[in-house]
Amino acid sequence: MTAMTAKTTSRSLLGTAIPYLLAILASFAAAGIFIALMGFDVLRAYSTILFTSFRTANGFIQTLLKFVPLLLQALAFTIPLTAGKFNIGGEGQLLAGAIGSTAVGIAFSHLPPALLLPLVILAGVAAGALWGLIPGWLLYRFGINEILTTVLLNFVAFSLVNYVATGPWRDQGAGHPMTVAIGEGGFLPMLINNPPLNAGIIVAIIVAALVYFYTTRTVAGYELVATGANPRAAKTFGIKTRLMFISSLVIAGAVGGLSGALEVAGVQHRLIEGMQSNFLVLGLIIGLIAKGNNLAVPFIAFFISVLEVGASAMQRTLLIPVEMVFIVEALILVFVLLSDVVRRR
Amino acid sequence: MVILRMEGIRKAFGGVPALDGVHFELHPNEIHGLLGGNGAGKTTLMNILFGLYRMDSGDVFLHSKKISISAPRDAIAQRINMVHQHFLQVDSFTVLENILMGAPLKESLTMRFGEEEKKIAAIQKRFGLEIDLGATLGDLPMGTRQKVEILKALYRGVEILILDEPTTNLTPQEVDALFLSLREMVKEGLSIVFITHKLREVLSVCDRITVLRNGRNVTTLRKGEAPEEEFVRGMVGEEMNLEKSILFSGIRESRAAPLPGGEALLKLEGAGLRTADGLQRLKELSFEVRPGEIFGVAGVAGNGQTELAELVLGLQPPTAGRVLVSGRDVRERTTAQLLGEDVAYIPEDRLHDGFLPKANIAQNLILGAQRSRPYSNGWLIDWKTVFASAQEMIAQYHIKTAGPGEVGGNLSGGNIQRVMIARAFSREAPLLVAHNPTRGLDIPSMDFVYSKFLERKAAGRASLLISEDLDELLLLCDRIGVIYKGEILGILPREKFEKYAIGQLMSGVRREA
Ligand SMILES: Nc1ncnc2c1ncn2[C@@H]1O[C@H](COP(=O)(O)OP(=O)(O)OP(=O)(O)O)[C@@H](O)[C@H]1O
Ligand SMILES: [Mg+2]
């Protein structure tokens, strides 16, 4: 009996992994044609993309540093997706979190680490949660589409960052709009000093584990899944679906805010205009490739981080534009979705 | 003469065969009943013919020519069309728009459909399918929506029309009207494949039947050539013992016993429901359901049955009067609490209101009970227990599935209904609200559900059985209340059950007291 279940699960695991591997292969092959047509060395390009992360300690740590915001951004997308809602506001939530963390980190810069660090992180989480609460409440109260509101709130966040980074806290010495550094008590401790790796990775992994636990083991998580699977049936059977929508957006906002807080406390130590990078889009791609499966998200996020770090190296050494990797990532997504359509028949 | 022949059709899903070398032949101008238990493979076979599934092996011949169909588009080009068991329509579109949707049209940009409208009107007249083309689909009752699908197929031009359980959502009158239309169609040269679980329909409308069981052919019979018993046996399968069945032999023990006593588990006191825009959905309902009673609600669909169920479940608070469950006003508790403590529910529309197609069977089986023991402690779900009891329910309620982890959407229509049944009956709740609980079930499963109702009765539990199947109500109920336009026009005790009287009440004719 146990052997049988083990066998079926391993088969279904393989069954799910194979389409992914095929999709990855197919997209590399397709992008390879482009690279070759552009007159570059395909093999060298790909070996740079895939192995930069593993050749040097620095490469690996770069990858982990990328992994943290990507993982959290992807989760900020997949949590509401579980309930059938689309959060396209991950970067707004990141920035809101970064603003919250920076504000607290500067205002209370004299506090000791034991106080300031938790405050900085909490402020970021709270600010992000607020950024999720607004679209959640608009959806709950007026039924306004969350895609629209989350996207619009990104722009509000951009303006806010601009306002804060060019306001009284501006670092006058820097050319680019950014604030002065937060108090040292708000810095995340280092796991390794050289090359530098902060403790953010541990926080991110714990959060990913908690999210997985929440959605698969708890009653609230079950109700979230049921709501996403069929909101009408969920409601008929007593689940407060609108509350599910709002809470999923608030949790997502908090996770998005945390990604901002960790960037501030761990990496930048200040608010910088443009610090959201392209994390939102990559987070969406990760979440979509994972098809909303929170267990798959960390693995795919890591894989995408490897590609991203490899891409910058490729640009530096081979002069191939980084956008090439973006094409590969998008192609993987397309092929994964395609394999779904094919398999269904 | 054969117009369509399917030969040696095989199809497996994830290694499990659903069709295993099936043969099927369709003659011109016939209504051909495709029969078999839930999960036998009827829908799968027809989905292959319609190009929705690809067969693993086998051949399809149309007019003795081998054809290959890889998408519905090909099937439609070959003049084959299908009305699905669970069809998809756009609620916010009009009937006309739904019919034209997906059709290749010259005027698709200008949206001037005058000519098409005339064409459709002509078809309507020919086959007696009267529907207002301008009506918004979402406002129409199920029976009419079904007609829209048939009209859509006819409009596209068909020679072979597949109807997958077209009568499940129809009232008896609508069924009669449909059969008249079908007869017209075969007269005009169509051939029809008709999937159903209802014996009476098979006997009254089918010229021949093909019976499948577990993905294999059992028999093909022609009406007139085989005795009726053989038809019946073909439908119910070899195993079913007709003597012992509730459905065929009725209920043995005397059912004229006095009404059980005890405090009512459900009590309505002048309960009414008025919508925000002033429509009176339910009016002054007063009745009670006592422990050990099966109380039936008869009526033509759309007369307030769904609202009544929603009232009892606390999904809509009454706007007048009171509803008491186990002596407590429903407004005191949330739906989640009611479901966790006192009530089990089988909704009418399983696919929309009762099922999570993207979730697995185990997740589906605990819907509504996710906060209660033994499945959870209120915070965490004990999946081990859930899977174990899901496994038990799958066995006990004969749900045909690979296991508790299988995605719900893979189940056949009747097996989805079995999930509804298993979920509701396994709760052993004091009160069961069951709305058309046997819809889409094969005959042995129906019989099984009836035995479950009687078990509840014997255990002193109360059941509110809302059904459009009068035979079912007459068979099981202690009392029947007839609902018409949101009002209970009369309540009859078992000894006064009479089909004609109930039929009168159902059409709104009140008896003089
Ligand atoms: N897409 C699918 N994926 C996996 N299994 C499937 C799929 N479609 C059908 N099956 C399985 O194939 C078998 C036959 O299903 P089918 O829907 O053809 O039954 P049916 O005869 O129409 O039954 P019903 O009377 O309940 O509608 C069932 O066991 C079902 O679970
Ligand atoms: Mg079917």
Image (cartoon, helix red, strand yellow):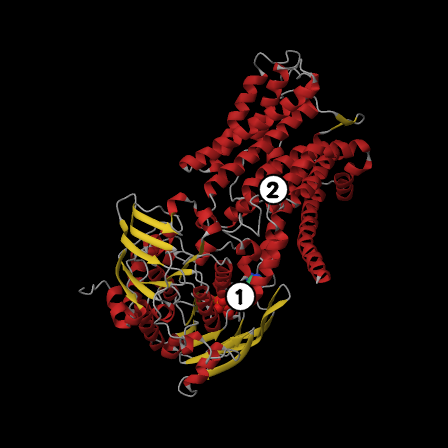
Tags 1 and 2 touching, CB below 8 Å = no
- Whether labels 1 and 2 belong to a single chain: the reply is no
- Secondary structure beneath label 2: helix
Q: Could you tell me the amino acid type at mark 2?
A: Tyr
Residue corresponding to mark 1: B397
The chain to which mark 2 is attached is: A
Q: Name which quarter of the figure residue A276 lies in.
A: top right
Question: Mark 2, residues whose alpha carbon is within 10 Å: few (<14), some, or many (≥20)?
Answer: some
List the residue tagged with mark 2.
A214
CB of mark 2 near ligand 1 (< 8 Å): no
Residue displayed at 44% across by 61% down: B86
**Secondary structure category for the residue under label 1:** loop
Q: Is residue A215 above or below residue B115?
A: above
Picture coordinates of residue B152, whole percent (x, y): 37, 62
Q: Amino acid at mark 1?
A: Tyr
As measured in the structure, the alpha-carbon distance from the residue carrying label 1 to the one carrying label 2 is 31 Å
Position in image of residue A232 (x %, y %): 44, 49
Residue depicted at x 56% and y 57%: B361
Residue B80 location, quadrant = bottom left
Q: Is residue B461 visible?
A: yes
Q: Is residue A228 above or below residue B28?
A: above
Which residue appears farthest toward the front when viewing the image? B262
Which mark, residue B304?
none
Residue B25 in the image, given as x and y percentages of width and height: 49, 79
Looking at this view, name the residue that lies furthest to the left.
B512
Is residue B84 visible in this depiction of the protein? no
Foreground: A325 or A83? Answer: A83
For marks 1 and 2, give the one nearer the viewer. Answer: 1
